[in-house]
Amino acid sequence: MNRETLGVRRWTWAWRLSLLPSALCLVFAAQPAYAFKIVAPAEQAVLKAGQAVTAKVDLGHDTGVIKVRYYWYAEQSETLVEQEEVKEEAGAGKNKIADEKYWQRDSAASGAIIALASLVATAQDSPPFGGPLRIPSNAVGAMRLLAVGEISRGRLGTRTLFDEILVQVQPESELLSIDFETDKPLQLGRTGQSASYGQIDSLGKIFDLPVVGLFADGVPRPIAHPSAGTAYRSSDEKIIKVLPEGMLQIVGKGPATITVRNRGKEASLDVRVEVNDEPNEPPVADAGPNKSVKAGTKVELNGLNSRDPEGEALYYAWSQVRGSKVPLLDVNMPRASFLAPQVSEKRLYRFKLRATDKNGADSLPAYVDVWVEP
């Protein structure tokens, strides 16, 4: 082989190798997501309340998906239902917009509100397993979009998989005023107690207020959580103390005024506290360290490190606030448990623990993240 021929061959190989990075980029760019994933709307997208956006998922390597349901939750609200129950119990249907009851308040004044599917899509929709998804008209602040895919396993029935993203929702209309969905003035304690607030009759009790924003479009929106832009101020921190997450704590007796501010508007609520004089410090909840587990294993949530400053026995309440709903056992025990579901990619499940002492004082919420791996 002469030098000229050898030079041509070297040049040819160099030219081919120079194309390799570009070719690899094209190959990798063309690869789908490894597992079921929401691709639209985007994570942390800023959306408008009542707006219709296109929902889209990438199935990745997950095959056999026959249906995808989409749910809206406020970031801090609980995962309330087994998603497969929604069609029969809540009447969710194909492309049904559930615009009224997507939202659940974690408040002493409210009960559970069943979450309805905002969209149910199949392979026949455009895009497949997606389509027009309406942001609830009364949404505001940080919202979770949960997509639950249903996979057929023939005679073995079905199994589910999910993805979840956080977005920010802002109303287009101006905030006109702020109101409180409670008695005015609010009486806390044994004298003239508001029945909707249960037994708020002890020092140390932690509670939140149902705060509603009245907007120019006529839609009232829940704005109690700071993620909606709400800030709180107490006229007397020796009676009612402002805590994180928009929560309030009874620390003394007498009158106080709670002022709420959002988008340049303010509203005040007069509160009269008449509670038991016995000093009482609220308990401290401890949901344990975050952990990673394998699918199919039994997972134990351990709240035994929760404590009460007075050394009293505690009552426990576990709930789930991220991830597709799992059957959680022993939710009122120090240790709760669940069976880690099958996943095709690492997924996050988040749980919340509240502890209550014998006098009715609640802890601030404690959270634990459980990552489930295939």
Image (tube, helix red, strand yellow):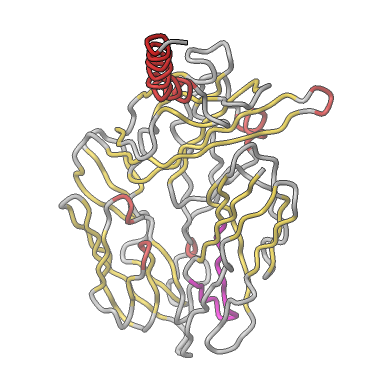
Q: Residue at x 60, y 80 (%)?
A: 358
- Dividing the picture into quadrants, the one containing residue 24 is top left
Residue 287 or 170: which is nearer the viewer? 287
Instruction: Return the x and y of residue 196 as percentages of the image width and height.
Output: 48, 61
From the viewer's perspective, tell me whether residue 355 is left or right of residue 259: right
> For residue 355: magenta?
yes
- For the C terminus, which image quadrant? top right
Segment tinted magenta in the rendering:
351-363
- Residue nearest the viewer, comparing 266 with 325: 325
**Residue 250: x, y in percent?**
40, 77
Question: How many numbered tags mark residues here?
Answer: 0
- Where residue 295 appears, as percent x and y from the top left, is 70, 46
Which image quarter: residue 261? bottom left
Q: Position of residue 240 (x, y in %)?
A: 33, 76
The residue at 52%/87% (across/down) is 309
Q: Nearer the viewer, residue 260 or 15?
A: 15
- Residue furthest to the front: 2
Look at the image and tell me whether residue 267 can be seen: yes
> Hey, which residue is sitting farthest right in the picture?
155
* In this view, 52 is above or below 109: above
Check if residue 69 falls in the magenta segment: no
